[in-house]
Image (cartoon, rainbow, N blue to C red):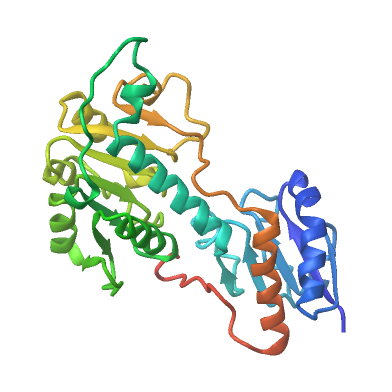
Amino acid sequence: MTVNVLFAAKPARWAEYEAPLRTEIEAAGVAAHIATDIPADQVDYIVYAPNSEVRDFTPFTRAKAVLNLWAGVEAIVNNPTLRLPLCRMVDPALTQGMVEWVTGHILRLHLGMDAHIGAAPGTWNPVAPPLSFDTRVTLLGLGELGAACATALAHLGFQVTGWSRSQKDISGITCLSGTAGLDDALASADYCVLLLPKTPATENTLNARTLALMPRGARILNPGRGPLIDDQALLAALDHGHIDHATLDVFRIEPLPAEHRYWTHPRVTVTPHVASETRAAYSSKTIAENIRRGEAGEPFLHLVDPGAGY
């Protein structure tokens, strides 16, 4: 039996995904018709990007699952018409991209690379950087991406603490949870990396109160979600020198408006939401495996809990 797979994303993405999806679904042993224009009542699976034109899931009467192309699901999880299982995107390329961005930017700051790259010719200032053994990194969020980044940083010798809403246990990482755990995690953070999902409970996790808990001179990296930070509180902490630097990849409004202070603040580095990109060659494997599981009656991978929002 042939299953019908609707690709519901921006048209430019179809050119990128068409061949990899066909290859990986066939390799998974599933006969499938994959297209962008299948009638809703004939669709078995929806490969979905939240910026697609599909907003009403009511007509998809025989569909078995929505397979999100993005790691984040906040733009779809609260859709009142969605009654299907929703699977978020987890794949090795997403994880590897995030590990490389986080470790790369922490090492850039840790080693003082900007001072050397921007130095005038003839500048000779042989100040040795600190060692990772003496540097404390806190990761807020210990999901797939957070756990991978925490482990990579620990392997580089950093003292790593991770905080999550529910208690985790990761070898080599000090794992904390709860409100008191969050305060303790921030109080010991020379660097803080935000990798929490966007939910009502996580909005403004870094605010005036929690920023004040951090050691003076701490650095912040946010490749997670823009609303995790109270922007005005962070700018104030940067202006006063309590926070030494913020490297930000995600923002409440994207692209970041040209007039936003982050662009010109001397203590801020802006990157254009590139920390971890979905790559068709890898994410197609995750999608194909979930379609195979659906057809075999096996549990889907990376199911979203609507109550938790991720």
Relative to 237, 295 lies left or right: right
Relative to 205, 185 lies left or right: left
- Residue at coordinates 77% horizontally, 63% vertically from top-left? 21
Locate residue 221: give its quadrant: top left
- Image quadrant holding the N terminus, namely bottom right
**Residue nearest the observer in this picture, 298 or 19:** 19
Count the labels in the image. Answer: 0
- Point out residue 263 in the picture as x, y percentages from the top left corner: 40, 22
- Residue at coordinates 49% horizontally, 56% vertically from top-left? 74
- Image quadrant holding the C terminus, namely bottom left
Relative to 202, 4 lies left or right: right
Residue furthest to the bottom: 297
**Residue nearest the observer in this picture, 200 or 31:** 31
**Can you see residue 306?**
yes
- Residue at coordinates 33% horizontally, 42% vertically from top-left? 106
- Point out residue 158 in the picture as x, y percentages from the top left corner: 25, 54
Whether 20 is drawn above or below 242: the answer is: below
**Can you see residue 231?**
no
Whether 240 is drawn above or below 271: the answer is: above
